[in-house]
Amino acid sequence: MPAQAAPIPPVNSMGFAKPPAQTRVVVAMSGGVDSSVVAAELASQGYDVVGVTLQLYDHGAALAKKGACCAGRDIHDARRVAERMGFPHYVLDYENRFRDSVIDEFADSYLAGATPVPCIRCNERVKFRDLLETARDLGADCMATGHYIQRFQGPHGAELHRAADPARDQSYFLFSTTREQLEYLRFPLGHLKSKEETRELARKHGLPVADKPDSQDICFVPQGNYAAVIEKLRPGAAEPGDIRHIDGRVLGQHRGVIHYTIGQRRGLGIGGGDPLYVVRLDPDSREVIVGPRAALAKTIIPVREVNWLGDRPFDEVAERQVEVRVRSTRPPKPALLRPLGNDQAEVELLTPEEGVAPGQACVFYAPDSSRVLGGGWIWRG
């Protein structure tokens, strides 16, 4: 009789045809409830879990600061979760990488009149690049995070999809995830319908972070005071200049371009008359350009550094209908996407959008679908 082939083991919840105990998963742990639940759930299912927390900026300053991820308190909380669930936990000093890859660009972008999104760069250049390589070095089969986004296996490989809970969806911040990274990453919370489900799982495991508040600030920007951070990083950056109307009139003086953002209305110090908004920043002439609300409306958005997650190569894609999101807090809007080579494109919004600012991301979605098609960086207002 011919020898029978060994039975193929069933595929586990991480997508591997082997038992959970033989599947090593590195979990990126920020110390918050989301990533803690991911680690606890996987450990309870029998996976070989290794928790990793990144120290991204000055530990001493972090200890006294609440409301931001990866601070000293958060490192302590992540360690407590690992101890409770019985898996190893490591803290990696990524301060230099974080400063070089994220903070310096953030400062320079602000000085250039842009409105950067450092959380995207952190995911792109630190968590999903450097940390992912560390996970491979640790012999992990995959890396899991607490992000609210979904990963499905499609006919052409792994696909990125919006989270089941629209209120928690983090696809805007993960558009630059590459295909190669997506094959290695897992997002176990993306299917949950509410944050309360996550907290219930935390309580089920008896985690000390079950009721910990969500992070609100960018981790290295206390109380959202961007200008104070820029002045500290780039002394002398806050030079005064003119506030000029789009019709050419000088309306007053400002205390530094870094104190203003596109779409801002309050705090301009030029009261009286019809409401005026910041419509453009010109750091070279140190001018803040203001105008009526109608001047904020844009229909054409140039983007570059496009990361494309569609099925065909980007330079083979013809003009196509998509939905786009130009701010993390806004719903996707219908648009036309026109590729211009390998990594640039023009986006035409079918209805004008206000407050489109250089430095922000423009994220592409498939119409009538949850699929994320990628996105790019807005580089002109």
Image: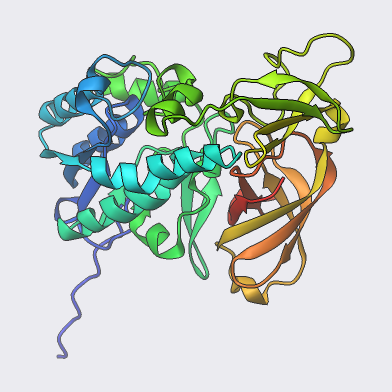
Q: Residue at x 56, y 42 (%)?
A: 172
Q: Vertically, is 203 above or below 294?
A: above
From this viewpoint, which residue is outermost toward the bottom?
1
Looking at the figure, which quarter contains the C terminus?
top right
Q: Position of residue 101 (x, y in %)?
A: 36, 48
Q: Is residue 163 visible?
A: no
Quadrant into which the N terminus falls: bottom left
Tell me how the rendering is colored.
rainbow
Q: Residue at x 41, y 37 (%)?
A: 189
| In this picture, residue 117 sits left or right of residue 81 | right
Q: Position of residue 23 (x, y in %)?
A: 19, 55
Residue nearer the viewer, 178 or 269: 269
Q: Does 1 sit left or right of 176 as displayed?
A: left
Residue 377, horizontal then vertical, whole percent: 59, 51
Q: Is residue 39 above or below residue 179?
A: above
The answer to which image quadrant residue 78 occupies is: top left
Name the residue at 64% across, 64% down: 344
Question: Which residue is more in the foreground, 16 or 334?
Answer: 334
Side (left or right) of 147 relative to 77: right
Q: Position of residue 259 (x, y in %)?
A: 58, 24
Frontmost residue, 300 versus 79: 300
